[in-house]
Structures are given as structure tokens and as C-alpha cells.
Image (cartoon, rainbow, N blue to C red):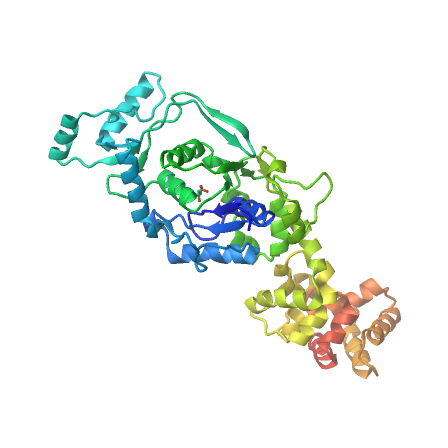
Amino acid sequence: MSAVRCRFAPAPSGSIHVGNARSALFSWLYARGRGGTFILRIEDTDASRVSQAAVGGVLDDLRWLGLDWDEGPEVGGPHGPYRQSERLGIYRDAVDRLLADGRAYRCYCTPEELEERRRAALERGEPPGYDGRCRELTKADVARFEAEGRPAAVRFRMPEGPWVVEDLVKGTVRFGPGQLRDFVLLRSDGTPVFLLAVAVDDLLMGITHVVRGDDLLASAPRNAAVIEALGGVPPAYAHLPLVLGPDGRPLSKRHGSTSVEAFREQGYLPEALVNYLALLGWSKDDHTTFMDREELVASFDLERVSSNPAVFDVEKLTWMNTHYIQQLGDDELAARCLRFLTGAGLSVDPLTLRAAMPLVRERMRTLAEAPGLLRFLFTDDVVPDERAATVIAKAPEGYLKAAAEALDDLEGWDATSIAAALDALAAGAGLGRTKGWQPVRAAVTGSTVSPPLPESLELLGRARTVARLRAVS
Ligand code: GLU
């Protein structure tokens, strides 16, 4: 194994937002393409918010996307535990070292004092942020505060700026003097702050490349400073630009679905979502769209990640999904449709389902469309929808009865004979194929749109076909 070690470090709140899924994917692709290690770390120090179900949602999403992890929850590894809530002692040890080395200090400022000084700074037209009040407390000050029983947070002594991050995506990012103040590592109740936990874990877990959203760009110099203060070498950082909705605002609920789970439930294939997410801000070249997992792993590089925000286009995802549905074999497509059909309350005969795949594959944009297309095969409770009812009502007198007779009398029961019988019936009524077949389709499938009719009837079987025609004639 090469030395590359990447991680995905979600703060779980259920299913993963597709923007974060893209961070996970890019991190995974970078590790996999270099024979490296991909680590999953659960950032749940704010334990009150993080339920077991929320963590389970993250693991399910990653598995469904096929982003396997070499170290992390459920698989373990040499740098565990991989849940931050189980690493509190580790963070406190790190803080003790920073305090002992003078790289951190106790801060006795109360929230009220901080707020007051923040407001005063704003009034003076100065940037808010910690003013360093407790940086150089005398022993006497400390003794007095301790005697008062004042709670103390621990603050990091941010080294003098300017600070520079050589970001693999953003390029050289500079933070000017005064931009990064001393920040809290440990709250007065002893709980670690995100900036501490991330730095300590990236250091101890030997992370070489941090790939994450650019909302965390300003954390990078802080993370790096803590790692250096602990005697380590910071990882390389790659901050990915935001994922936007079509209106140019960050992708959120107001744009519709945003979670991996939502896309799964809507019948998108993980192959399609992975391929689509890979192209959100990255490209192999100027013409390649469809890439399977192997090709993505082989060609992905952080250097080709764009530093501009990417717009999430669900139409394109759907178009790609249609492509991936065409690529699946009949057995595989049937297996993937099954959950959607049973979820719609249908009792599915596996052989019929498999045989129906060639009929519906080209009509399906998502797996969730399977129940609508195939319902008539797996239930006899077929009530014509509004359009179908109109078509049935407008059929020539006796037409459907004649259809029932003709099909009942048919010698063989195969699509070719069925088509011939339907054509003869239509011609007898002076109708063409389109108009002539439509009442039969409406009566048998309950809909005016269905998979190819003769093949559908062949699959449905003579008895059920004839019974449905008789029921409406
Ligand atoms: N836990 C952070 C989040 O979910 C990510 C931290 C990181 O990647 O450094 O936003």
C-alpha cells in the first residue's frame, strides 16, 4: 500500500447530502487510484444530536454508493476508535500537551464578556473575534479566577499570520493579519471543539490528503496550526467548491431532493449517481461522460477538479440513469426493480418479472417507474385510469367483446399471433393499429401507456387477458 491516506469525516445527521457524498467520492477515488487507504471517521462529539440511526444512515449510503472504507466503524483499524465521541481522552491529552508547551492557554472570559467585547469591536469598526485577553494572564490573575471558581475554556494560541494554505483545488489561499484569532479547543465543560478533534485525528490517523467542502476552507490554517503545534506535518488540503442548485444558491431542500437516500428511493442507480457526482466539478477530459467505477478510479485526479461551484442538474442525472438502466442485464435489472414493486404492494412472480425486462427497459428512466409500467402483470385489481376509461367508453360497440373472443379462440399464445389477431380485429372495425389496439391496452393494463401490447398480453397469459376484456365489455 502506498502512503496515501484519505478520509471522509461526516457529522452524521441521517442520509448524506449529495454535496458531502461528492466529497466522500472524491476522497475515495483519490485513495483508490493510488493504492491508498480510505478511512471513515464519525464526527459525533456533539453527541446530543447524533443518534445511532443517523450513523447507520451514513454507513448505508456509503455502502449503497460502493464507497468501501478500509478503516472505520464496523471494520476497525489500527487508529481507532473511529467515532470521535469515543476519543475524548485522546483530545484531552492533546490539549494537556499544548498547555504544557505554551501553545494553548486557559481562557476565563465568560460568554457575556465575550459578547460585550464583540459588540464593542463592531462599533469601533474592528473585526469581531477573540481579542486575546487571556493570552498573557499573570499567575495572580489565574489564581484569582480559579478562586472565584470561574470555568475555563482552553484556547489555542494561533501563531502570527499571515497564513497560507496551498490548496490542491483552490491554489494558494492567504489569510490576512487579524483574520484568524485564538480559538477554543476545549469548552469549559471539557468537551472538544471540532477544530481540535479534526486536527488531532488527522494527525494521529496519518491522513495525507484532506478532501472536503470549501465551507471548511478557513478551518484549514487552524487545523494545520494545531497539527504543527503537536509536532506533526499537516496533510495536503483539497477544498471542493460548493454544489449549487439551478438558481445558483447552495443546493438545499428548496431545490428538491438533496440526500443520497432520496435519490435511492426515487430509483436512481448508484452507478449513475456515482458517475454523475464525479462530474460535479471534475472531468476526465473534454468529452468523456460515462465512466464506470474502474475508469473513474484510474483517471481521477484532484488536479482536474474545478475551483468553480458546480450546478446540480437532476435532468442530466436522470439522463445518465436511463443510460445505466440500459447497461444492466435482465436478471440484474429485475432484481433492482423488485424492491420498488413489492414496495408498491405487488406480489411479484420472478420469472414473469425477468421476462418483462426487455419490454420495459427502454421506457424506464428510474427504477421507481417499474410499478407503473408493470403493475398490470402482478395484480388483477386493474381499474382503468381516467384516460383508459375514456378510451374504453369510446370503443366501437362490441369491440372489446370481439377482442375477448378472438383472443380466446387463438390457437397459439405468442406475441406474433396476438398481434395478428389484434390487427385483424382493428381492420374489421376500420381502424388502424394505433387506434385499434388502444381499447384493448386500456382494458387489460388499465392505462393508455404500457409496454408493447402483444408481448405484454403474452406474458399476462390468455386467461387473465380474456377475463379483463370480458369484465369491461
Ligand atoms: N465533520 C465535518 C462535516 O461534516 C467535516 C470535517 C472535515 O472534513 O474536516 O462537515
> Which residue is at the front of the view, 374 or 201?
201
Taking the image in four quarters, ligand 1 sits in the one at top left
Classify 414 as above or below 252.
below
Classify 65 as above or below 209.
below
Q: Is residue 199 left or right of residue 388?
A: left
> Which residue is at the front of the view, 135 or 263?
135
Q: Where, quadrant-wise, is the C terminus in this rendering?
A: bottom right
Q: Is residue 13 visible?
A: yes
Q: Position of residue 273 (x, y in %)?
A: 61, 51
**Could you tell me which residue is drawn at 28 percent across and 31 percent down?**
102
**Could you tell me which residue is drawn at 56 percent across and 39 percent down?**
245
Q: Is residue 266 left or right of residue 223?
A: right
Classify 7 as above or below 143.
below
Q: Is residue 268 visible?
A: no
> Which residue is at the front of the view, 191 or 122?
191
Q: Position of residue 53 (x, y in %)?
A: 41, 58
User: Quarter of the image holding residue 447?
Assistant: bottom right
> Which residue is at the front of the view, 230 or 349?
230
Which residue, as the protein is rendered here, is positioned at the far left? 147
**Could you tell me which residue is drawn at 63 percent across and 49 percent down?**
297
